[in-house]
Image (tube, rainbow, N blue to C red):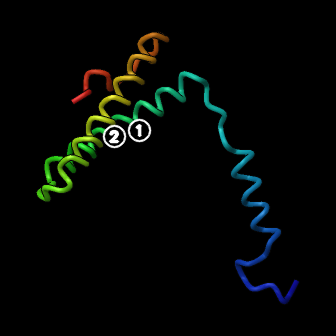
Amino acid sequence: MGDVKAGLNPLSKMGGLYSRIVSKKVLSEDEKILLMLKQARDDWRRAEGRFQEVIENDLIDHTIYDLQSAKTRYSYLMKQAKDKGIQCDFQSQQN
């Protein structure tokens, strides 16, 4: 294997891929909802930030749509968490 350039060894790439797959933690249903909820909250905050900064008239409708979409997704996931009795440490930080 002396001809294989450094970093291009297919066996080392496969070993890295295998270790990432094997070490991947399997999330419970509750953990998945909490992760999606955190991501939705972050998306909502980013959408609010973009809405506050947009000045182009053509983009205002788009940012309003994004903001409403992010808020709706967060609310949906929050309801799912509540229905399953999942407690979130950021429930009071919706806005």
* Residue occupying the point 73% across, 60% down: 16
Disc 2 marks a residue whose amino acid type is Asp
Relative to the observer, which residue lies in front, 62 or 16? 62
* Residue occupying the point 34% across, 35% down: 41
Question: What numbered label is drawn on residue 14?
Answer: none
Disc 1 marks a residue whose amino acid type is Gln
- Residue with the mark numbered 2: 42
Q: Quadrant of residue 73?
A: top left
- Relative to residue 81, is residue 8 depicted above or below? below
Question: Quick one: label 2, few (<14), some, or many (20+) residues within 10 Å?
Answer: some
Residue at the limit of the structure toward the right, as seen here? 1
- Relative to residue 46, is residue 93 depicted above or below? above
The residues bearing labels 1 and 2 have C-alpha atoms spaced at a distance of 5 Å
- Residue with the mark numbered 1: 39
Image spot of residue 9 (x, y percent):
78, 76
* Residue occupying the point 53% across, 27% down: 31
Image position of 81 (left or right of 14): left
Image spot of residue 48 (x, y percent):
21, 42
Total marks placed: 2
Image spot of residue 55 (x, y percent):
11, 57
Circles 1 and 2, Cβ within 8 Å, touching? The answer is yes
Image spot of residue 78 (x, y percent):
38, 21
Quarter containing the N terminus: bottom right
Image position of 27 (left or right of 46): right
* Residue occupying the point 33% across, 36% down: 70
Q: Secondary structure at mark 2?
A: helix
Q: Secondary structure at mark 1?
A: helix
Quarter containing the C terminus: top left
